[in-house]
Image (spheres, rainbow, N blue to C red):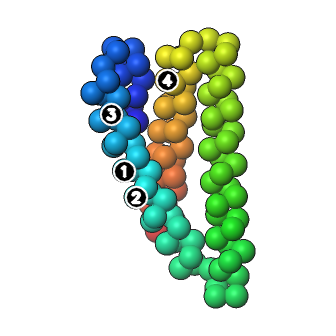
Amino acid sequence: MAALPIALATHQPVILVLGALAAGTGQGLAHRAAQASVINAASVAERGQVVSAFYLAGYLAIAVLLVGLGITIDHSTPLIGLTAFTTITIAVAVAGLALNKRTA
């Protein structure tokens, strides 16, 4: 993920592609693990509601981040916006990992 603003700043498409592949792979693996965790924690009777809430929370979170990215870019530069987006995304991921370790 950190490679994305670097690619934008240096105009290196190879870094952009590698960063996007790494970020996409990490996001996919994290989503798969989180979804499995949510499904396993829910009772059979509540599973549909819990999975729906999981997706709603995920879509709302990404929507807020992307609208924030658009607003930031409108008021600054694409590099500043992408750097802020990347920083927030990494910080949330690290906080999630720390919280997961603490509760495990």
Q: Is residue 67 left or right of residue 83?
A: right
- Please tell me whether residue 30 is drawn above or below residue 69 in the rendered image: below
Q: Is residue 22 left or right of residue 65?
A: left
Secondary structure category for the residue under label 1: helix
Give amino acid for label 2: Leu
The quadrant in which residue 76 appears is top right
Of pointers 2 and 4, the one earlier in the residue sequence: 2
- Quadrant hosting residue 6: top left
* Residue pointed to by mark 1: 25
- Tell me the element at label 3: helix
Q: Residues within 10 Å of mark 2 (few under 14, many from 20)?
A: few
How far across and down, in percent of the image, does residue 65 sit?
Answer: 63, 37
N-terminal label among 4 and 1:
1
Q: Are marks 3 and 2 in contact (CB under 8 Å)?
A: no
Mark 2, residue position: 29
The residue sitting at 56% across, 21% down in the picture is 81
Q: Local crowd at mark 3 within 10 Å, few (<14), some, or many (≥20)?
A: some
- Name the residue type under label 4: Thr
Query: Rounded to the nearest whole Å, what is the CA distance between mark 4 and mark 1?
Result: 20 Å
User: Dot 1: within a 10 Å radius of its alpha carbon, few (fewer than 14), some, or many (20 or more) residues?
Assistant: few
Q: Is residue 72 above or below residue 94?
A: above
Q: Are marks 1 and 2 in contact (CB under 8 Å)?
A: yes
Q: Are marks 1 and 3 in contact (CB under 8 Å)?
A: no
What secondary structure is found at the residue carrying circle 4? helix
Q: Mark on residue 11?
A: none
- For the residues marked 1 and 2, what is the alpha-carbon distance in whole angstroms? 6 Å
Residue 32: % across, % down: 46, 64
Query: To which residue does mark 4 refer?
Result: 83
Give the SS element for disc 2.
helix
The residue beneath circle 3 is 17
The residue mark sitting in front, 1 or 3, is 3
Q: Is residue 84 left or right of residue 58?
A: left
